[in-house]
Image (cartoon, rainbow, N blue to C red):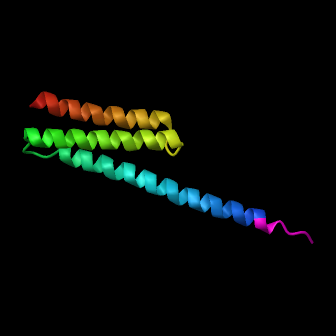
Amino acid sequence: MAKKKSSAAKRHRQSEERRLRNKSVKSSVRTSAKKFVTLAQKKDRASVEITETEAALRDMIKKIDTAAQKGIIKKNTAARKKSRMQRLFNSLKTAQ
């Protein structure tokens, strides 16, 4: 009886490593998006907070682009998320 166990086990190890890596990247994207949204929805805004919000937006866009480039999220999903967050930021700038 032939055993083809080693290649299946290796494949399983590889997929588990990739799954954990992808999970951490997705989590960091969600965390940065949440950080940006909470900064954007603060009631009392100052010019300092706008620059802080802009920095959070840039960080979030960078993480989304990286995840899309690695194939963790799809390109259209990345574009949609960036567009929505950019619209939110632009509405903040015009409100001031």
61 on left or right of 2: left
* Residue at the spot 15% in from the left edge and 39% down from the top edge: 50
Q: Is 92 left, or right, of 70 in this rendering?
A: left
**Residue 91 horizontal/vertical position (percent):** 19, 31
- Above or below residue 28? Residue 56 is above
Farthest right residue? 1
Q: Which residues are magenta?
A: 1-6
Q: Is residue 79 left or right of residue 9?
A: left
SS assignment for the magenta stretch, majority: loop
Q: What quarter of the picture does the C terminus occupy?
A: top left
Q: Choose top left, top right, bottom left or bottom right for residue 62.
A: top left
Horizontal arrangement in the rendering, residue 22 relative to residue 2 (left or right): left
Quarter of image, res 14: bottom right
Q: Position of residue 22 (x, y in %)?
A: 50, 53
Q: Nearer the viewer, residue 63 or 37?
A: 63
Residue at 43% from the left image edge and 37% from the top image edge: 78
Quick check: is 24 in the magenta stretch?
no
- The quadrant the N terminus occupies is bottom right
Residue drawn at (22%, 34%), measured in percent from left and top?
Answer: 89
Residue 3 falls within the magenta-colored stretch: yes
Depicted 6 relative to depicted 38: above or below: below
Expressed as whole percent of the image width and height from the top left, the position of residue 86 reads 28, 33
Residue at figure coordinates x 29%, y 50% from the top left: 34
Viewer-nearest residue: 73 or 52: 52
Q: Position of residue 30 (x, y in %)?
A: 36, 50
